[in-house]
Amino acid sequence: MKLNRKVRQGKNADMKITFYHSALCPRCLLVGRTLQKLQQEYPNLVVEKVEVTTRPVESLRNGIRIIPALAADGRKLAGFILTPTAVRKFVAKIYECPPAID
């Protein structure tokens, strides 16, 4: 019999956020700048950038229909206009409440 134990990640563990963007999207540039600033505040924040124009199948398979979009631990934040406040809240929520790992 296999036990399914849940282990919480600590705040020292790397926190990965996937950033779906396009080089031609001015809104994406603003979100990218916000993420760069947040990486200074959260040293364990790792941002994986996915260029949707060169990797469209991967984006669609992950449920991304609009950019800019952020995804982390099964949570997504997307919108025509993502404010710095919304991005900051998303990162803080991921950082403060990491998911349990099987």
Image (spheres, rainbow, N blue to C red):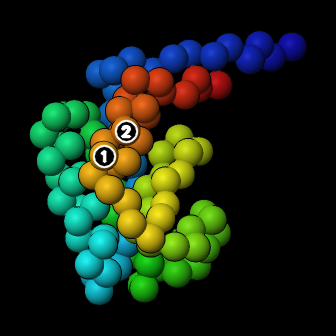
Of residue 40 and residue 84, the one placed in the foreground of this image is 84
Number of the label disc, if any, that sits on residue 85: 1
- Looking at numbered disc 1 in the image, what kind of residue is underneath it? Thr
Q: Position of residue 51 (x, y in %)?
A: 38, 76
Q: Residue at x 29, y 86 (%)?
A: 24
Q: Quadrant of the C terminus?
A: top right
Number of the label disc, if any, that sits on residue 95: none
Q: Quadrant of the N terminus?
A: top right
Of residue 14 and residue 74, the one placed in the foreground of this image is 74
Q: Residue at x 53, y 51 (%)?
A: 76
Q: How many marks?
A: 2
Q: Position of residue 98 (x, y in %)?
A: 48, 27
Tell me the crowding category of disc 1: few under 14, some 14 to 19, or many 20 or more residues within 10 angstroms, Cα based.
few
Q: Position of residue 34 (x, y in %)?
A: 21, 54
Work out whether 64 lies above or below 48. Answer: below
Q: How far separated are the C-alphas under marks 1 and 2?
A: 6 Å
Q: Element under label 1?
A: helix
Q: Residue at x 23, y 70 (%)?
A: 29
Number of the label disc, if any, that sits on residue 89: 2
Of residue 21 and residue 31, the one placed in the foreground of this image is 31
Contact (Cβ within 8 Å) of mark 1 with mark 2: yes
Work out whether 1 lies above or below 78. Answer: above
Q: Position of residue 93 (x, y in %)?
A: 43, 32
